[in-house]
């Protein structure tokens, strides 16, 4: 991670010292500050309005395409025909945008979604000055930034502010139901321990550089393809997968990364983009200078966006992997595959062509199970699930049961940002988060950054052979 210059760091410290004691004036409303938005997730948090959140949002950013693309998305939400939002963006652009934010302290919650090279420093600076932070993943992209993130959590606790990351995948209904069925011992049994070659839990996520967001083709910033600024895939999207492993397998349990996490293997590999593909998704005719180091034969841009982590967590073997392709097949989008192996049944989420590229959860009994008895047990336990998720049903398909949920639960990835925001607002109102959240965020970013360290060492060793 590239650090700020010494001069900039000193300016930040002076601004923090001058403003730490400043109280946010006006009403009890939450006032948002958007700092250096460069990822579309910053805008998705404003696709909805929220009770007790001031519609005036203060934006601080350097001049350039990143902030302009962000403002275009907010304007599109404000002017849409159905349920338009009414955000008012107060924008400051200038080289001293960070110092200006600290001096004005125009809000009490900083929203961060952008260049990950700077993000951890932004987080630390914000909590040091007494501001809450809601940050997009990843909050750390290497070992150095992980150590700084640990300091940020300590500072947040000292200054009585909340630091939270945006884990949208906890709100995807098939994942929620996978977790729910895993807590039915009569159906699932207990989670197996697995082995490194046959893990008890597997999660794989497939993403695409070219995609549509809110109905429009997404224009990505060129820095998104620079792993020094965006981070490698093994520390980016895998953040969600590692989070889900912790959240599903050990619900509401604190994870101690020093005792509970052991990386057994990790690897990384590149996706190659043509100049035409790069131009289509960035609107740039040539590669910027900082990407030329990654340009090889036939002008292909190698992006280390793919990664796999094998690890043990509290004695359970897990594997998470992320794959980035350029564009999804027709009718498809980003996809998710997940298996939780129980002593009585496996819980499997598939999202391939056979499922119409929509996530589908199946309950698959262990080999030699009496299927008639299993079905009777499963149906007897459905009341527990339906009490929490009314309308959820199971339907036999061969030797498995497909779980179906009413359409109202399938609200889509973009809607999950509002759900995360609502949860964070609840935590702000309570003045605290569940005790397991902070240690588990720390454990999560240790897992991803340590895996990157191991994968890069492996790549370096392989290249010397």
Image: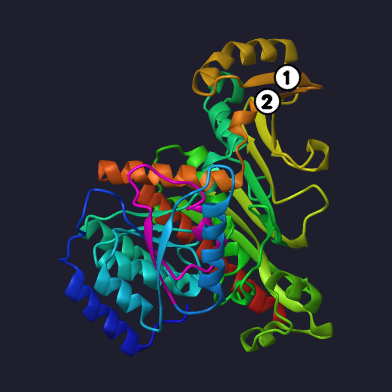
Mark number displayed over residue 34:
none
Q: Is residue 105 above or below residue 63?
A: above
The one of 296 and 10 positioned closer to us in this rendering: 10
Q: Which residue is mark 2?
A: 404
Q: How is the image coloured?
A: rainbow
Tell me, yes or no, if residue 316 can be seen here: no
Q: Residue 356 sits in which quadrant?
A: top right
CB under 8 Å between discs 1 and 2: yes
Relative placement, left or right, of 300 versus 39 is right
Q: Which residue is mark 1?
A: 395
Residue range in magenta is: 34-61
| Position of residue 367 measured from the top left corner of the image (x, y, whole percent) | 75, 25
The mark that comes first in sequence, 1 or 2, is 1
Q: Residue at x 78, y 43 (%)?
A: 352
Q: Residue at x 68, y 73 (%)?
A: 282
The one of 174 and 253 positioned closer to us in this rendering: 174
């Amino acid at each position: 991670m590239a650090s700020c210059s010494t001069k900039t760091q000193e300016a930040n410290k002076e601004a923090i010292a001058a403003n730490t004691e400043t109280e946010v004036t006006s009403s009890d409303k939450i006032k948002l500050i958007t700092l250096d938005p460069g990822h579309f997730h910053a805008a998705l948090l404003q696709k909805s309005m929220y009770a007790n959140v001031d519609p005036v949002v203060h934006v601080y950013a350097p001049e350039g395409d990143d902030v302009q693309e962000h403002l275009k998305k907010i304007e599109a939400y404000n002017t849409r025909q159905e349920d338009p939002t009414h955000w008012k963006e107060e924008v400051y652009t200038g080289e001293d945008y960070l110092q200006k934010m600290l001096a004005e302290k125009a809000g009490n919650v900083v929203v961060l979604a952008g260049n990950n090279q700077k993000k951890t420093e932004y987080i630390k600076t914000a909590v040091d000055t007494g501001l809450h932070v809601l940050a997009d993943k990843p909050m750390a992209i290497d070992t150095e930034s992980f150590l700084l993130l640990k300091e940020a959590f300590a500072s947040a606790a000292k200054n009585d502010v909340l630091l939270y990351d945006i884990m949208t995948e906890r709100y995807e209904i098939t994942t929620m139901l996978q977790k729910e069925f895993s807590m039915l011992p009569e159906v699932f049994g207990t989670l197996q321990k697995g082995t490194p070659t046959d893990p008890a839990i597997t999660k794989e996520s497939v993403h695409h550089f070219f995609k549509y967001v809110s109905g429009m083709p997404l224009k990505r910033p060129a820095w998104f393809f620079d792993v020094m600024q965006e981070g490698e895939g093994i520390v980016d999207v895998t953040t969600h997968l590692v989070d889900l492993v912790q959240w599903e397998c050990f619900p509401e349990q604190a994870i101690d990364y020093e005792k509970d996490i052991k990386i057994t293997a990790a690897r990384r590999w590149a996706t190659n983009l043509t100049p035409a593909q790069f131009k289509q998704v960035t609107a740039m005719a040539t590669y910027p200078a900082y990407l030329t180091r990654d340009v090889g034969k036939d002008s292909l841009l190698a992006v280390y966006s793919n990664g796999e982590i094998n690890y043990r967590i509290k004695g359970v073997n897990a594997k998470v992997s992320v794959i980035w392709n350029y564009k999804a097949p027709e009718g498809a989008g980003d996809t998710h595959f997940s298996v939780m192996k129980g002593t009585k049944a496996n819980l499997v989420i598939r999202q391939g062509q056979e499922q119409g590229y929509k996530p589908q959860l199946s309950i698959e009994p262990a080999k030699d199970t009496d299927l008639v008895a299993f079905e009777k047990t499963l149906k007897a336990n459905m009341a527990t699930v339906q009490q929490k998720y009314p309308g959820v049903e199971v339907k036999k398909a061969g030797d498995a049961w497909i779980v179906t949920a009413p359409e109202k639960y399938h609200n889509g990835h973009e809607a999950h940002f509002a759900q995360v925001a609502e949860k964070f607002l609840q935590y702000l109102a309570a003045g605290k988060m569940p005790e397991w959240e902070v240690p588990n965020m720390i454990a999560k970013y240790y897992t991803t950054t340590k895996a990157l360290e191991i994968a890069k060492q492996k790549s370096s060793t392989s290249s010397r052979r």
